[in-house]
């Protein structure tokens, strides 16, 4: 598919999804339990987009020659997208086919957490290899202080959220799985921050388009996870259309990034 | 000995790589690499120019794969001025 067609499709999906949520909000229908049509649409779109992202990331792995130092990074990202896709399919099975909230924690959570870990390691591979390449600046040390400042700035909010999630009143497994999401977000955000610093020097080029999409996807995922964590603390998790919208947009961004990278190496 | 103005080489690299790595990187990186290779001078021999192009495109491999990097390298080398040009 040509890039302009793909981009039009992405834009149409993003705009229609945002418009749907804006309408739901303006009608005072923020809680997704009151909007089953949006739940079905969001769940199915998330599965589809995660599959598309996995497909294109896998194509990138296949097309990069053996020995390319970025290949392992793409393999881990593809595995992470694949785990997201299966997790979202399980989620959709409960919420669309059975019309119930999926159990929490469930196998879907195990897959999501596995996806985060895989992607975090994948991004770390990119940081290491891009950072020391001639075109990537060649010096990872220059990112050390800004990354430390970024991590420290996130720490207090994360600590408060983790404290509330891990110290809540539910079963221990439920509390720890809830707390794992923001903790793994941080694990992804740190290499994502460094990668943003490295790849922003490529602004205006196709390499930047790839990473702007993928890193925006993680920013959206983290925002959705924060809403999930906040609502969990308040005891009303998995009820929010905004959260579903952010996850949908994040998969859209992942799929676009993987699609663009596939075009770059083809 | 035939030489090529280094600005001509850098401009060719920049023009070819801008769509892939953006204007900032395509302008700054070849200059930084030429300094690393001790080639930051007004004139380059053809051999030095080829070495610079190869080194820059080598750095591209990790971002776009070998096939795309080699294609870019060949495109630049094909545009390099021949004997007596670009002095």
Image: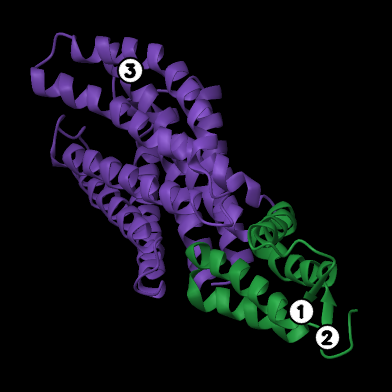
Q: How many marks?
A: 3
Tag shown at residue B58: none
Look at mark 2 in the image and give the residue it sits on. Answer: B2
- Image quadrant assignment for residue A218: top left
Whether residue A205 is visible? no
Name the front one of labels 3 and 2.
2
Q: Name the quarter where the N terminus of chain B is drawn.
A: bottom right
| Chain letter of the residue beneath label 3 in the structure image | A
Residue located at (89% from left, 80% from top) = B86
Q: Earlier in the sequence, mark 2 or mark 1?
A: 2
Looking at the rendered structure, the secondary structure element under dot 1 is strand
Chain B: give its colour. green
Chain A: give its colour. purple
Q: Residues within 10 Å of mark 1 (few under 14, many from 20)?
A: some
Residue located at (35% from left, 38% from top) = A39
Look at mark 3 in the image and give the residue it sits on. Answer: A231
Measured in 3D between alpha carbons, the distance from the residue under mark 2 to the one under mark 1, in whole angstroms, is 6 Å
Across and down, in percent, residue A182 comes to 32, 25
| Chain letter of the residue beneath label 2 in the structure image | B
Disc 2, disc 1: CB below 8 Å? yes
Whether residue B6 is visible? yes
Across and down, in percent, residue A54 comes to 35, 59
Look at mark 1 in the image and give the residue it sits on. Answer: B45
């Amino acid at each position: 598919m040509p890039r302009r067609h793909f981009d039009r499709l992405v834009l149409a999906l993003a705009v229609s999804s945002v418009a749907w949520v804006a309408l739901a909000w303006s009608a005072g229908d923020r809680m997704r339990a009151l909007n089953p049509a949006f739940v079905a649409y969001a769940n199915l779109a998330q599965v589809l987009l995660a599959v598309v992202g996995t497909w294109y990331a896998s194509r990138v792995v296949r097309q990069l020659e053996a020995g390319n130092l970025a290949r392992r990074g793409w393999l881990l990202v593809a595995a992470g997208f694949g785990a997201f896709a299966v997790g979202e399919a399980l989620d959709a099975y409960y919420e669309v086919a059975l019309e119930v909230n999926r159990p929490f924690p469930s196998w879907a959570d195990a897959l999501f957490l596995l996806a985060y870990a895989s992607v975090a390691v994948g991004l770390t591979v990119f940081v290491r290899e891009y950072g020391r390449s001639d075109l990537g600046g060649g010096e990872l040390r220059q990112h050390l202080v800004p990354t430390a400042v970024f991590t420290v700035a996130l720490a207090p909010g994360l600590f408060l959220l983790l404290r509330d999630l891990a110290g809540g009143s539910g079963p221990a497994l439920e509390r720890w799985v809830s707390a794992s999401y923001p903790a793994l977000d941080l694990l992804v955000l740190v290499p994502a921050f460094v990668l943003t610093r490295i790849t922003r020097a490529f602004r205006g080029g196709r390499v930047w388009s790839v990473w702007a999409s993928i890193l925006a996807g993680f920013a959206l995922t983290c925002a959705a996870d924060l809403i999930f964590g906040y609502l969990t603390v308040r005891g009303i998790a998995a009820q929010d259309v905004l959260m579903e919208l952010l996850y949908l947009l994040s998969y859209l961004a992942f799929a676009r990034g993987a699609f663009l990278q596939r075009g770059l190496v083809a | 000995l035939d030489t090529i103005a280094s600005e001509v080489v850098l401009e060719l690299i920049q023009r070819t790589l801008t769509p892939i790595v953006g204007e900032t990187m395509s302008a700054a990186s070849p200059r930084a690499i030429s300094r690393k290779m001790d080639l930051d001078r007004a004139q380059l021999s053809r051999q030095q120019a080829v070495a610079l192009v190869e080194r820059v495109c080598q750095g591209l491999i990790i971002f776009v794969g070998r096939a795309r990097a080699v294609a870019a390298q060949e495109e630049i080398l094909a545009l390099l001025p021949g004997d007596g040009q670009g002095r």
